[in-house]
Image (cartoon, grey):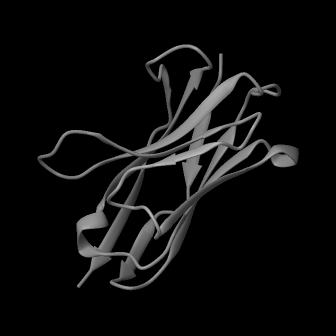
Amino acid sequence: QVQLVESGGGLVQAGGSLRLSCVVSQRSVSRYVMGWFRQAPGKEREFVASITWSTAYTVYADSVKGRFTISRETAKNTLYLQMDSLKPEDTAVYYCAARRLGVLSYDTWGQGTQVTVSS
């Protein structure tokens, strides 16, 4: 069973940057797609970005395209989300998630990390 632990959230001013990390417990994640999601107060959880671990193929939500970068470091089994040009509307709890290739839904989630962007 994959376990995910996020870190790196915090408070930042608009226009600033943060990098989130997600350590993946399972040694072999080559058959997984890893994603970042977020949930703002009073809103539904939404997709932010994903990366296929084996190929580094990435997908982004339109709202973050050009500002956020998802990546992974295979030697450390760690997933990252580099967030630049942050906006107040990026404020949310950010979650790391995993799903197996060929499976549509994410079935493993981290505990979440708070990101707050002040105006």
42 sits to left or right of 90: left
Q: Is residue 108 left or right of residue 14?
A: right
Which percent across, then down, holds residue 57? 65, 42
Q: Residue furthest right?
A: 75
Q: Number of labelled discs?
A: 0
Q: Measured along the vertical axis of the image, is residue 63 above or below residue 12? A: above
Q: Position of residue 119 (x, y in %)?
A: 23, 85
Report which quarter residue 64 is drawn in: bottom left
Q: Is 31 or 117 nearer to us in this picture?
A: 31
Q: Residue at x 29, y 64 (%)?
A: 91
Left or right of residue 85, residue 108 in this image = right
Tell me what residue is drawn at x 17 percent, y 51 percent: 41
Task: Tell which of 102 and 84 is nearer to you.
Answer: 102
User: Residue, x 71% and y 44% (percent of image)?
Assistant: 56
Give 67 or 91, whichever is nearer the viewer.
67
In the picture, the quarter occupied by the N terminus is top right
**Residue 113, x across and y down, in percent:** 44, 53
Q: What x and y, as percent, mark residue 82?
A: 56, 65
Residue farthest to the left?
42
Which residue is pictured at 47% across the width and 63% down the height?
9
Viewed as shown, does residue 92 lie left or right of 4? Answer: left
